Image (cartoon, rainbow, N blue to C red):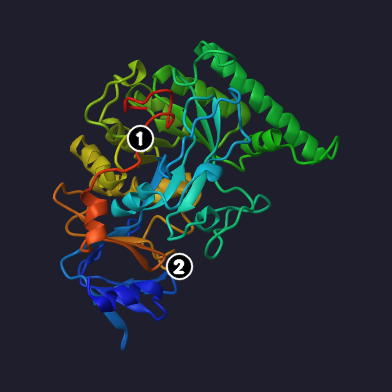
């Protein structure tokens, strides 16, 4: 990258047109030899004509896609399982996230610009997740993407602070949250404790709505009330078909806004998922194993759910799969029958909708944040490399630099598998 482009990336104080690349907006057909106009951190226009007198960046032969959105990640260098209780809704991944950790830069090297950083699945309710834009800052508050509890979601201009809801809630079933002490020993015990907690959330919501009883903040109960009121999305770790059915029952009983994660056995209950339009965020692995409930994972899940009209996204579960290879997840799904258009949307616009962030990110749409990725070739080719990642008009990854090469191809310093998701340090599928 030349010095002029580096200076341009620092602020983009004036409108700039990125020209010559094939644009993949996701929410509309691709534009060959396109022009992407960016100003003040926002996308201003997509066209095939350069506005008169505008500064240009030549990307002839490249492809531009929206910044990738990862619905399930554990980057940030933290241990994200705690053992306070089986149900611990007051915990927040925000308090454990280190924006300076090398894993954040590696995620940008994979084209990821927005993430949902999750507590692990070692508890029935592991805590609150963190919706983060991977801006360049050492302060986690500068990365938050928050909504207003009192109004429909409207993404704030620029970095958010801890006002409103800044993430979802991690819940889990299956074998991961089973354990000693007060943890459940069976699936029926898990469902009982989850129903009990959500019922307490309903009681708290009724109390706050009616004005009866104390209205002082109650950390755990207020978070549960956010779940049953639909203000906070439940991101639910699940693998087996019977566990999916249990979540469907909880959703009906408590009117939850749910996203299913992993969903290894989705192929067994596609009609149920389609009937309830339950969004599914899939992990794509080509060497399943490590736990009984993931043994029947199918690469065809994406294609089958797409055919049924179920919203489909992909996630890394980093470090279970590498953020730098996130595009590969969509490529594997296409190899198993999913459409290329649906697979690219599953990395961008669909996960943004699952996190209620699609007003700001997920597509190359005028008015949205200028989060985009410059690719060496077509988006889902195994030969294609992420060359640049731009976040709100700022170049935060450049493969052509020595640091970019290190991030894209080097090892993973400081990796801690233990306590990331579940109770294993083996790297098995979670």
Cα distance between the residues tagged 1 and 2: 29 Å
Badge 1 or badge 2: first in the primary sequence = 1
Relative depth, front residue between 144 and 33: 144
Label number found at residue 219: none
Residue marked by disc 1: 282
* Image: 384 above or below 255: below
Please state which of residues 232 and 109 is positioned toward the viewer in this rendering: 109
Q: Secondary structure at mark 1?
A: strand
Where does residue 117 sit, x and y in percent of width and height? 46, 42
Query: Is residue 428 shown left or right of residue 44?
Result: left
How packed is label 1: few (under 14 Cα within 10 Å), some, or many (20 or more)? Answer: many
Which quadrant would the N terminus be assigned to in this image?
bottom left
Look at 62% across and 22% down and name the residue there. 195
Q: Is residue 79 above or below residue 400?
A: above
Residue closest to the far left: 383
Q: Nearer the viewer, residue 323 or 198?
A: 323
Position of residue 129 measured from the top left corner of the image (x, y, whole percent): 52, 41
Residue 430 sits in quarter: top left
Say which residue label 2 marks: 367
Residue drawn 31% across and 88% down?
53
């Amino acid at each position: 990258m030349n010095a002029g482009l580096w200076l341009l990336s620092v602020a983009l104080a004036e409108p700039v047109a990125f020209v010559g690349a094939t644009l993949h907006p996701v929410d509309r057909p691709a534009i060959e030899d396109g022009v992407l106009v960016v100003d003040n951190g926002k996308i201003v226009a997509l066209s095939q004509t350069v506005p008169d007198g505008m500064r240009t960046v030549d990307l002839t032969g490249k492809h531009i896609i929206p910044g990738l959105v990862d619905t399930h990640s554990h980057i940030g260098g933290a241990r994200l399982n705690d053992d306070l209780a089986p149900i611990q809704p007051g915990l927040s991944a925000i308090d454990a996230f280190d924006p300076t950790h090398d894993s954040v830069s590696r995620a940008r090297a994979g084209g990821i610009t927005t993430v949902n950083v999750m507590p692990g699945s070692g508890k029935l309710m592991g805590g609150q997740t963190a919706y983060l834009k991977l801006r360049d800052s050492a302060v986690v508050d500068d990365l938050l993407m928050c909504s207003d509890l009192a109004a429909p979601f409207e993404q704030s201009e620029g970095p958010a602070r801890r006002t409103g809801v800044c993430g979802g809630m991690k819940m889990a079933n299956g074998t991961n949250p089973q354990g000693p002490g007060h943890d459940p020993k069976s699936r029926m015990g898990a469902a009982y404790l989850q129903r009990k907690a959500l019922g307490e959330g309903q009681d708290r919501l009724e109390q706050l709505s009616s004005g009866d009883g104390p209205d002082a903040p109650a950390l755990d109960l207020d978070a549960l009330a956010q779940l049953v009121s639909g203000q906070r999305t439940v991101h639910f770790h699940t693998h087996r078909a019977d566990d999916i059915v249990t979540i469907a029952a909880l959703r009906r009983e408590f009117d939850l806004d749910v996203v299913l994660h992993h969903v290894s056995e989705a192929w067994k209950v596609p009609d149920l998922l389609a009937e309830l339009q339950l969004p599914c965020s899939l992990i794509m692995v080509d060497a399943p194993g490590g736990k009984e409930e993931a043994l029947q994972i199918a690469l065809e899940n994406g294609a089958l759910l797409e055919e049924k009209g179920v919203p489909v996204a992909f996630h890394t579960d980093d470090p279970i799969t590498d953020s730098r290879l996130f595009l590969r997840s969509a490529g594997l799904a296409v190899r198993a029958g999913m459409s290329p258009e649906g697979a690219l949307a599953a990395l961008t616009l669909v996960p943004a909708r699952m996190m209620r962030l699609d007003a700001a990110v997920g597509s190359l749409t005028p008015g949205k944040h200028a989060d985009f990725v410059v690719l060496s070739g077509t988006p889902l080719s195994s030969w294609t490399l992420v060359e640049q990642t731009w976040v709100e008009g700022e170049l935060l990854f450049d493969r052509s630099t020595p640091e970019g090469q290190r991030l894209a191809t080097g090892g993973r310093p400081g990796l801690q598998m233990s306590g990331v998701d579940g109770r294993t340090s083996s790297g098995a599928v979670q």
